[in-house]
Amino acid sequence: MHHIITDGWSFDVLARDLSACYRAYTDGTTPALPALPVQYADYAVWQRHTLPATLQPHLAYWTQQLANLPALLPLPTDRPRPPLQSTAGARVLWHLAPDLRDEAETAGAAARHDPVYDYAGGVCRAADALQRTA
């Protein structure tokens, strides 16, 4: 299951509840799921009242840190930017220099058991490539 649907802890809860529902369905009964002390709407209301004061210093800090960034990242391109930006995606392949590729593979080898590290490593490599280009 993709991590956008559930996290590691929630996956166990989801699997347990889904199994209970399936078992009840096949038995022709109603699933006996534990009652939840709060619903997601309760959490959303709590968060809406609690977070603004907590997040305000963080928001102020990052607003100041990012205030002077350029509107566009001045990356070298092979053609001018279009007047109207599109969100259409594409697949772009490029080859890393052998030494950079070897470093990336070595750094990720120890963490292969966790796909988050592979993803984070990819994000770091992309950020590094953008930094070197800009």
Image: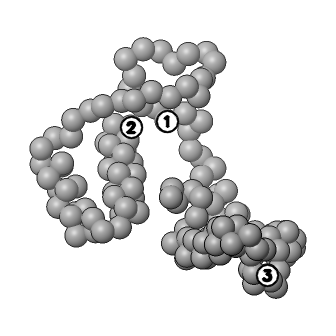
Task: Give the left or right position of residue 123, taking residue 50 as reference.
Answer: left
Residue 24 placed where, x, y %? 70, 73
Residue 125 placed where, x, y %? 32, 50
Query: Which residue occupies 59% across, 23% down?
Result: 86
User: In which quadrant of the rendered image does the C terminus lie?
Assistant: top left
Query: Are the residues at dot 1 and dot 2 in contact (C-beta closer than 8 Å)?
Result: yes
Reading the image, the residue beneath label 3 is: 36
Front residue of 104/83: it is: 104
Rounded to the nearest whole Å, what is the CA distance between mark 2 and mark 3?
Answer: 51 Å
Amino acid type, callout 3: Leu
Q: Is residue 63 above or below residue 96?
A: below
Amino acid type, callout 2: Ala
Front residue of 20/124: it is: 20
- Of labels 3 and 1, earlier in sequence is 3
Name the mark nearer the viewer: 3 or 1.
Answer: 3
Task: Give the left or right position of residue 133, taking residue 25 as reference.
Answer: left
Reading the image, the residue beneath label 2 is: 134
Residue 43 placed where, x, y %? 81, 74
